[in-house]
Each structure stands twice: as C-alpha cells, then as structure tokens.
Image (cartoon, rainbow, N blue to C red):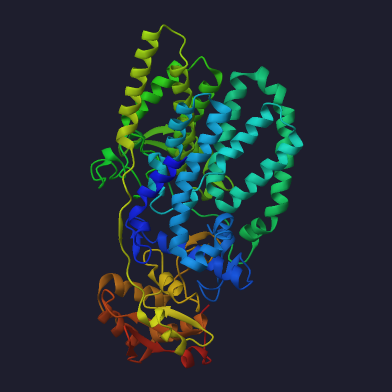
Amino acid sequence: MLGFALAALLLYRPLWSDLDGGYLRFSGQDQNLWEWFYAVTAHNVLNFENPLFTTLQNYPAGVNLSANTAMYGLSVPLTPVTILFGPTATFTLVLTGGLAGTAAAWYWVLSRHLVTSRTGAAIGAAFCGFAPPMISHANAHPNWVALFVMPFIVLWLLKIVRGAPPVRSGVVLGLLVTWQIFIGKEPLMVMATTMVVFAVTYALMAPEHTLAVARRLGLALGVGASVSLVIAAVPLWWQFFGPQSYSALEHGMRGNDAASFTAFATDSLAGGGNGEDNASGLAMNRTEENSFFGWPLVLVIFGVTIALWRVVAARAVAVTMFVMAWISMGALVIVDGEGTPIPGPWMLLFDRPLFESVLETRFSLGCVPLIGILLAMATERVLRLRARPEQRHAATITWCSALVVALLPIVPTPLEVTERNAAPAFFTDGTWRAYVRDGSVVPVPPPHVGNADALHWQMEAGMGFPLVEGYFVGPDEEGEGIYGAPRTRTSLILEHVATEGKVYEVTDYDRLVARSDLRYWEADVLVLPLGTRHQHELRATVTALLRDPGRPVQDVWVWDVHALSKSSGVTFR
C-alpha cells in the first residue's frame, strides 16, 4: 500500500512541486472546473449556504451543483484543506489519493477475500489502480480516479452471497453506495452495470448456487437501497427536479474503436508520450483513452481466460469483461475507423433513463477490475501449482515473463504539467471590489467550455463575485443538458472575435441586445485582461457595443456598466 502511494506521488510529482502555478497539460479546462467545485463547496460550507446550488457561475440563473460532479463525498470533508491550502491542493490530493486509495482498497479485498496469494493480490490491485484508462482520467477527472469505495461495495455483496446477515449487511452496503453517490454517480452506474452482467452470467453458469442466495441477496439489496435513498433523497431530487436541472445530457455516438483495445495509451512507456502513433483518431481526447490496454495484455488475458475456463467464477468474470468491452463499442462496432454492420448492446441502452447521459466509451472501465481479478487468480494458481519443483519453477518463470511483457509497456509515465495563466492582479489584490457592487463580473469573452480561466480568477479573489455564463452542465432552452450556459448574442459575438481575431461590425440591434444582456446579467463591470489573445479586436468590439471606450486599470481593461445594466429597458428573454 505504501508502494501504491509512492507510485501515485511520482505520477503527480510535477503538480505537487508547483501548486501555485502548475496545471495538468492535457486536462483542457477541467482542472479549472474541478478546482472550482472544491472552492464553491468550501465557500458554501463556510458561509452556511445551500451546498446543492450556487449563483457564482451562470449568474443570475445559477448552477445545480447536485446535477454536476461536485463530489460532496470528498469536497465537504476536505473543506479545511481547500480553505487552508487552496483548491489546487485539494484537486491534487484527491487525484493522488484516488489512484493510491483505489489500488490499496482492491489489494485489501483481493488479498483477504478473493485470492490467497498476496503477490497475486498486489499485481491485480496495482492494475486496478494504475491501468491505462485510470491514468488517462488521472489527467483531469477525479471522479473516475477516486474509486476506492467500489471494492468494498463488491466485498459486501460477496459477504452477503457467502452468508452474512442480509439486513445488517444491507445497511453497510447502503452506506457505501451512498458515499459513492456523493463521490461519483457515473462510475457507480458503470460498476452497477458490470455487476448486473456478472450476476446474470454467473446465474446462467451455476444456477444451483444462484437460487440458494437469491432471496438473501434480494433482501440485502432492498435494505441497502432504502438506506441509500433515505440519505440521498434530497440531493437526488435536487439533481433531477431542482432549479437548473436537466432531463438528459446527449453526447452523440462515442463508442470505442475495436482497434483501441490493442493500442498503447499515451501516458504509458510504450505510448511514447505524444500519442500520435497510437492514440490519434482512436479516442475522443487525451482524457478518454478508456480502452487502451495494449496488445500484449490482451493476448495474456485471452490466454488466462482459456486456462481458467473450467473455474466458474473466473469464466463469469471473463465473459463479463468481454460484454463490458462490447457495450463500450457503442451501437455499431467500428474497427480502425471503419464502420461495420455489427450491432452492439448499446443499441438497446442508449435511450434508456440514465444511460442516455453516459458516454458509452467509459463502460470499458468496467473491464479494469475484472482484468485485475483475472491476473490475481492466475498468479495465485501458478504460485500454488501442485507439481514437481522443476515444473512449478518453470511455470512461475513463464508466468512472470508473460506479466512483464504484458504490463511493462503500460506502466504509466509522469503526467505532464505546464504553467497556468496567472490571474490578473486586478482580481488577486482586490481592486475588483471598487467596481462590483451587487451585480456580476462579465469577462471578455464570457467563460465557456473552451476557456474557463475566469473561474481561476474568481477563486483567486476568494469567490467574492459571481460570473456570467461559465463551464458546468445545465439545461438549454428545451431542458436538455448542455455544457455551459445557453449563449446570448453578446457572448457569441465576443467569442467570435476571440476566435477569428477580427473586429465585429456592430449594428444598432447588437447594441440594443447587448444592453438587454447586461441587464439580464445584472452586470457591474466588463473585464478584459491585457495580453489576451486578440485583445485589441475585443476591446474595439466592446467599445462599439457600449459606445464607451472603457479604461485601463492595472493589468486589465474595464467597462463600468453598473448604471447601464440597472437602467430600465426591454429585456430579450
């Protein structure tokens, strides 16, 4: 377990050594987002405000935090860390502790309840915590890294099957599931799907065993569900029916390419670090390499499946693994970029409640613990082989060699860190207080999925002012989920200028709508940091929209619009 902690620290060493300015290079805008979740949770706890909702983003409509990945199960207990050391420290701690904790939890469960070989348990647990899909998400997604509750959910299900009192065990199971709900619901759904597939598979393979435990398991699950719903009822209601909730989050077809399973992940020894030869075109982005196990490991797992086929539990695990991989391929199987007419199980799931909001590519993460279990079981059988000493020695050497060939290429490499853009002194030294009365700050352009630096400015200013629009998940005009806020005409104009680098030809209608948007936002000030890409074009466009040249203040250009946004007039909403 100490080794797992050391490995996680080494992976995040560049970030730990520069908490003030370090930024995970391939996290996109997600580091800003996750740090903001920890910061807003600490802000709400410290000020006794509703932890399920905030207007600090998307002002004045706000953000439904329960319908986002606020990770209350960790962000609330880690509030003292956030307050004392900042949200970057909390973000880094959750990522580091998530990897190490997931591996340690699986080692505990494997070594004490699934296999008798500590060596086998260590190998399986190391894979569960540091598998390529885990490292891919380790670039940006703490909710997919901190999976240390999952092994104990599996453990208590196993205890119930083995005869533990169903009511008492159901209570413990319900508490564990509740904690996982407050850490990450999407990973819980993937795990639940994996467990259902395993249960059905095992029931078909060993019906005589299944019938004997079905009643006890059903009672325990009922008790667990009741406990969990009682505790999580309000956050779940808020998520699905509260302010700024949404019906579903459509991602389009995002299945894994079959060729990705044999490719090497970017952040691995064999991946080369840039991913141009292995990952390009096979994954959505650097943080969604969910199926890059490498061809040596795929061959070894096929061999293990054949060797352990007579073992019912191992066979059920292997079949479940293949089914989860198949689900992750989406509605139609794609091989090396070429579509095929072969349908996948996702065809039956994609429009079902809850499943409609999940990326199907992530279901391959259900394969990770299954592969870890198979590696542990295979190692146990090799080390416990009943044979002559020379045969046992030869088998051990052969298996260890196979493990080296399969696992060495996918050993993770340290995650790359770059220097983040510093927050303007206008925010860090408190100058903003002279311009923000009771309204909002409008960054130029407003923050969105592709540029959420303004969230960092807000955190550096102690969460003292609300921002318009932003990076989160909320409803569009029809109630469907989208990333960010529905864009106004003004924000679209400013984003267009920031992208194209050309001054926008402003019309009287644009000015009228801009005034309406400012009134809706209850804007106090527009802020454009000096040095922003295409700053001259942005400044000229804002000046034309407001008929006001603004003025420089320290390292930003500001337009004080408090009086303008509070004036009466038509609002286009």
Q: Position of residue 544 (x, y in %)?
A: 33, 87
With respect to residue 508, does 320 lie above or below? above
Q: Nearer the viewer, residue 326 or 420?
A: 420
Q: Residue furthest top?
A: 388
Q: Residue 6: x, y in percent?
A: 40, 45
- Residue 82 lies left or right of residue 545; in this view the side is right
**Residue 288 visible within the image:** no
Relative placement, left or right, of 280 versus 198 is left
Q: Which residue corresponds to the image point at 63% horizontal and 45% vertical from the top-left?
A: 177
Depth order, front residue of 480/130: 130
Q: How many marks?
A: 0
The residue drawn where x is 34% and y is 84% is 542
Is residue 568 visible from the viewing direction of this image?
yes
- Against 551, residue 275 (above or below) is above
Residue 330 sits above or below residue 521 on the image: above
Percent x, y for residue 534?
26, 76
Which residue is found at the position 53% from the left and 41% from the top? 190
Q: Nearer the viewer, residue 263 or 61?
A: 263
Q: Quick one: 511 or 236, which is closer to the camera?
A: 236
Return the x and y of residue 390 as percentages of the image width and height: 36, 8
Q: Residue at x 47, y 90 (%)?
A: 562
